Image (cartoon, coloured by chain):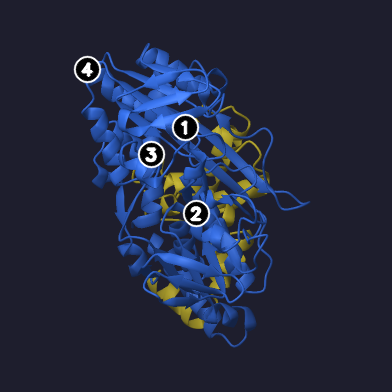
Chain colours: A blue, B yellow
Amino acid sequence: MSRKWTRRSALGLSAGLAASPLLGAPAVAQNTADVVVIGGGFGGVSAARALRRIAPGIRVTLVVDSEVFITCPFSNTVIGGLRDLSEISFNYKKLTADGIEVRVDPARALDPQARKISLRSGEILGYDRAILSPGIDFRWDGVPGGTPEMAALLPHAWKAGDQTLLLRDQIRAMPVGGTVIIAPPDNPFRCPPGPYERASLIAHYLSQHNPTAKILIIDGKDKFSKQGLFMAGWDQLYPGMISFIPFSDHAGIKEIVASEKRISTFFSDFEADVINLIPPQSAAKIALDAGLAGKGQWCDIDGLSFESKLASHIHIIGDAAIVGDMPKSGFSAATQGKACAHAVAALLSDKAPERALLMNTCYSLVGPEYGISVAGVYESNNQDNRLSSLPGTGGTSEAGEQPALRQSEADFARGWYANLTEEMFGR
Amino acid sequence: MHSRSRALILLGVGALAMLFLGLTSVYAETGRTPVIVESCTSCHGPEGISQTEMPIIAGLAVEDMTAALLAYRDKSRPATIMHRLVATLNDDDIAVIAAYFANIKGAR
């Protein structure tokens, strides 16, 4: 018995159900359903593929912005010179081969009442259910004097691609003994440990090529994800190179002079050679414009079905959504995408979504051979379906572990990334 | 096995095939991957067939997977992360996971 036998029998089962006059309405409902998934990242791709796998009768259209998807996870390895951008770049060919209709035509607007999605080309797609995984946009109004153009001088590199390379190249071109400022926003934002992994891998690069250079983290908050573990790793691997300046020590950014690479805070001024300014964020514009965040910045959803609390037949996952206690991570988005696919398949068969555990696992590299992790387990509660962290689960790697364990977690970090992206784009 | 599967498909009784394979819960009823398993494969690869540093969990015997998960749960087996993930799995969850991956062949 091969594993393909299993897959074929699952497909055969569904085909059998659809064809069987004995089994009736639910399968028929599935057969006629159109699901449009918006967003070609961790959430959208995972949702589209899972839906295709578990309910082959549903027509699945995936609307993406570009032929190539470059992952934010592991983009810090590109900035730190450990990987090439091509190693974190993926395409949608396997999804097309699976029978998913992939449209490279960015979604521009969503009309929840009419159940219509407008694409850039002018084409309009209808849907029985939509799964929205549009990610984030930047709130430039939350940056003093902020405009999108600022990123050409002060790269955010918080959407991977050209910005990743710009930041990498600016760091490579820094003068000897220069300064990098990383300015992360207050919570909530995409990938809570990301700025600190970034500081780590920039420090790894600098320790080899520019060892007297410094990294200042001028933070929009006082504490950050895996803080104790990161700081212990910095002391060990890059002593004296990285300084963390919590919000209460600067009271916020007052002025930014991009051309001079200067940041003034309410307490003091900082000059740098490279500034990685990570603006505050919101759900992507398409979700805000459709009213899916109400008067807020993020989309509230039901933790069992992932359906919007403000619009029926629209399910929202990933960074754009408020998913209970789950962090805004690529892995969370992938888990949510798969769970959402199950929920949508159930709803299209007139069944209730199944209550289930969802997990998040996020590795960070403090150095190429020094990994740390945070994990979480979440379950929708019985009162309001909020996905709540289960007490006694999850948490971070232990402090004070031996190098062999950090090495092991670095190896697992690489395996985690490879397997997650394989499930999304491969096989 | 191939001809058997084809025969089952033709008969449209895939659900029964799943029961013969010893699966439990939703998978047995619908042929769908149990939702809880979806969290496993993000790290351990599609169908648990890891091609990386992460352990392959496809094809593990039910008793081996059950023993491993129970040992992670009671923290008697050394782990980097698994003890943090399985702490609140109940025996039914573990049975579903073990049955699913035991049925995935071709990885070992």
Name the residue beneath numbered marker 2: A284
Q: Which mark is residue A176?
A: 4
Q: Quadrant of residue A194?
A: top left
| Mark 1–mark 2 distance (CA, rounded to whole Å) | 19 Å
- Where disc 3 sits, the SS reads loop
Looking at the rendered image, the quarter that the N terminus of chain A falls into is bottom left
Of the pair A122 and A326, the residue shown nearer to us: A122
Q: Which mark is residue B87?
A: none
Mark 3 → mark 2, Cα distance in angstroms:
16 Å
Residue A90 spot, x, y in % from top left: 31, 53
Q: Which residue position holds label 1?
A: A184
The amino acid pointed to by label 4 is Val
Q: Chain of mark 3?
A: A
Give the alpha-carbon distance from disc 4 to disc 3, as whole Å. Answer: 23 Å
Q: Amino acid at mark 3?
A: His
Q: Which of A73 and A219 lies nearest the eye of the viewer?
A: A219
Instruction: Give the letter of the chain under mark 2.
Output: A
A56 up-or-down from A187: above or below: below
Q: Earlier in the sequence, mark 3 or mark 2?
A: 3
For mark 4, give the secondary structure.
Answer: loop
Check if mark 2's residue and mark 4's residue have beta carbons within 8 Å: no
Q: Which residue matches tag 3?
A: A156
